[in-house]
């Protein structure tokens, strides 16, 4: 069994996998990680290996704790990946984005795939049918957009995300919800349309903390799935074991 740890900019996602099947999952904040590692160690004594991906700062003592318990792979830009990376600055590419592309290669081999991860940022990542990763886009996520409207203006309140009633916001709150949530939806639809013009057979995956919320207003044909990144990391571990 494998312990999979994805450290994002807002939350840490932890998964326990038996081969390629996820058997437990938890979303936590950085402060709870050490205790969670111990709890999982007790609950799942069959875990042998761990993999860690981080786009944030992870306490080195926590990493040591994990390494003391399991044979641990820390994802960096040098480890083997099941695709060719055509990003011109691979050393600055987010580790989480590598994992998303690995999941796309594993689950949609020889397909043109766009992965949209709606987390702290909304990231867009594209791999083609030749298993080449080309790049994509980085945009602010939902919470980041609400916070920036509040932070950089005198009058705009900080709101909890909500699907707008109408495209035409007729109050300050509704205008913000329309601008942020409808804005992200337009962005996602526009990006998908651009890719579809070039790759009509495009497969689109939507994942990340806000995937479920956004998928309520997106058309069918987009695969909304919450464990895509963890599945990608589990695959990277298997891929590196087999080499
Ligand atoms: N209590 C909360 N605090 C912060 N973000 C939250 C909360 N509940 C839901 N979210 C949503 O979760 C998103 C983060 O998703 P996640 O995929 O875990 O991000 P990351 O991988 O960047 O850490 C935020 O953009 C926010 O919209
Ligand atoms: C773009 C990101 C901040 C997204 O982070 P997340 O929303 O998953 O927390 C992360 O992938 C990152 O730090 N990337 C480095 C720059 C790049 O990918 O080119
Ligand atoms: K993201």
Image (tube, rainbow, N blue to C red):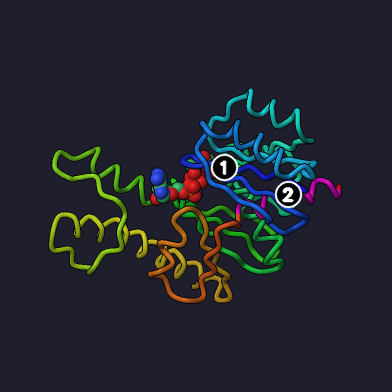
Residue visible at 54% across and 69% down? 223
Q: Main secondary structure of the magenta part?
A: helix
**Disc 2 on helix, strand or loop?**
helix
Residue visible at 69% across and 60% down? 105
Q: Does residue 216 show up? A: yes
**Disc 1 on helix, strand or loop?**
loop
**Earlier residue among tags 2 and 1:** 1
CB under 8 Å between callouts 2 and 1? no
Q: Decide whether residue 227 is among the magenta residues.
A: no
Q: Is residue 242 left or right of residue 207?
A: right
Viewer-proximal residue, 13 or 74?
13
Residue located beneath label 2 in the image: 236
Q: Position of residue 78 (x, y in %)?
A: 72, 38
Residue visible at 24% across and 68% down? 165
Q: Classify 10 Å Cα crowding around label 1: few (below 14), some (14-19), many (20 and above).
A: some
Residue located beneath label 1 in the image: 94
Disc 1 beta carbon < 8 A from ligand 2? yes
Q: Is residue 74 left or right of residue 141?
A: right
Is residue 196 depicted above or below 170 in this figure? below
Q: Is residue 104 left or right of residue 122?
A: right
Residue 41, by quadrant, is top right
Q: Decide whether residue 234 is among the magenta residues.
A: yes
- Residue extending furthest top? 61
Residue visible at 41% across and 63% down? 214
Q: Position of residue 192 (x, y in %)?
A: 47, 67
Q: Which residues are magenta?
A: 229-242
Q: Position of residue 142 (x, y in %)?
A: 36, 51
Disc 2 beta carbon < 8 A from ligand 2? no
């Amino acid at each position: 069994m494998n312990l999979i740890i994805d450290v994002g900019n807002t939350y840490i996602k932890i998964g326990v996998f038996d081969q390629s099947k996820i058997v437990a999952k938890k979303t936590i904040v950085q402060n709870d990680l050490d205790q969670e590692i111990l709890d999982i160690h007790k609950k799942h004594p069959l875990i042998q290996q761990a993999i860690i991906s981080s786009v944030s700062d992870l306490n080195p003592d926590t990493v040591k704790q994990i390494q003391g318990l399991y044979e641990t792979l820390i994802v960096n830009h040098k480890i083997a990946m099941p695709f060719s990376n055509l990003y011109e600055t691979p050393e600055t590419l987010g580790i989480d984005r590598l994992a998303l592309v690995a999941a796309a290669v594993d689950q949609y081999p020889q397909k043109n795939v766009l992965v949209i991860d709606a987390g702290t940022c909304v990231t867009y990542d594209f791999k083609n049918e030749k298993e080449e990763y080309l790049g994509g886009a980085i945009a602010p996520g939902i919470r980041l957009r609400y916070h920036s409207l509040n932070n950089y203006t005198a009058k705009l309140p900080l709101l909890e995300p909500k699907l707008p009633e109408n495209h035409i916001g007729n109050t300050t709150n509704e205008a913000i919800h329309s601008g942020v949530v409808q804005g992200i939806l337009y962005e996602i639809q526009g990006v998908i349309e651009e890719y579809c013009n070039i790759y009509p057979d495009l497969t689109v995956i939507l994942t990340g903390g806000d995937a479920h919320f956004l998928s309520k207003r997106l058309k069918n044909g987009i695969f909304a799935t919450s464990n895509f990144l963890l599945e990608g990391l589990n695959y990277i571990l298997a891929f590196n074991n087999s080499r």
